[in-house]
Image: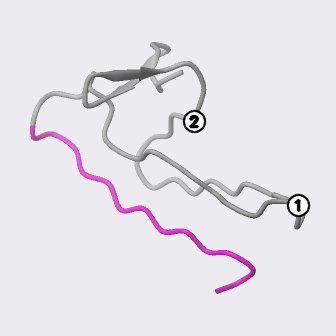
Amino acid sequence: MSVDGNPITIGGREFSGGFGTHADSMLAVQLGGKAARFRAYVGVDDEVAEGRGSVEFKVVGDGK
């Protein structure tokens, strides 16, 4: 769910699962060394007014 409790929607695509965070957030996903691939869709939720949000997304794997 989004931070406002709605389904996460990015670019018109609604997601049935995922994480909604607020400004200055960090999210850690522990894969336990069992994943060969990590895939994510990242963006500002459509519920945010046009031009009112931005996002910086960084993936760090095994400390790299």
Residue matched to label 2: 19
Amino acid beneath label 2: Phe
Q: Residue furthest front?
A: 36
When the figure is inspected, residue 41 is found, relative to residue 20, above or below; the finding is below
Label 1 crowd bin: few (<14), some (14–19), many (20+), radius 10 Å: few
Residue 15: give x, y in percent of width and height: 49, 23
Q: Earlier in the sequence, mark 1 or mark 2?
A: 2
Front position in the image: 33 or 54: 33
Quadrant assignment for the C terminus:
bottom right
Given residues 18 and 24, the one toward you in this image is 18
| The N terminus - image quarter | top right
- Residue highlighted by disc 1: 34
Residue in the picture at 68% in, 61% down: 37
* Quadrant of the rendered image containing residue 29: bottom right
As displayed, is residue 16 above or below residue 59?
above
Label 2 crowd bin: few (<14), some (14–19), many (20+), radius 10 Å: few
Mark 1 → mark 2, Cα distance in angstroms = 21 Å
Query: Residue flagged by tag 1: what amino acid is it?
Result: Lys
Horizontal side of residue 29 vs 2, given as left or right: right
Give the main secondary structure of the magenta stretch: loop
x, y percent for residue 41: 44, 45
Estimate the x, y position of residue 2 in percent, counting from the top left.
47, 24
SS state under label 1? loop
Please name the residue shown 35% across and 62% down the image: 56
Residue sitting at the far bottom = 64
Please provide the residue range marked out in magenta: 51-64
Name the spot of residue 4 as percent of width and height, x first.
Answer: 43, 18
Taking the view exactly as shown, the residue that stands out farthest to the top is 6
Q: Residue at x 57, y 52 (%)?
A: 39
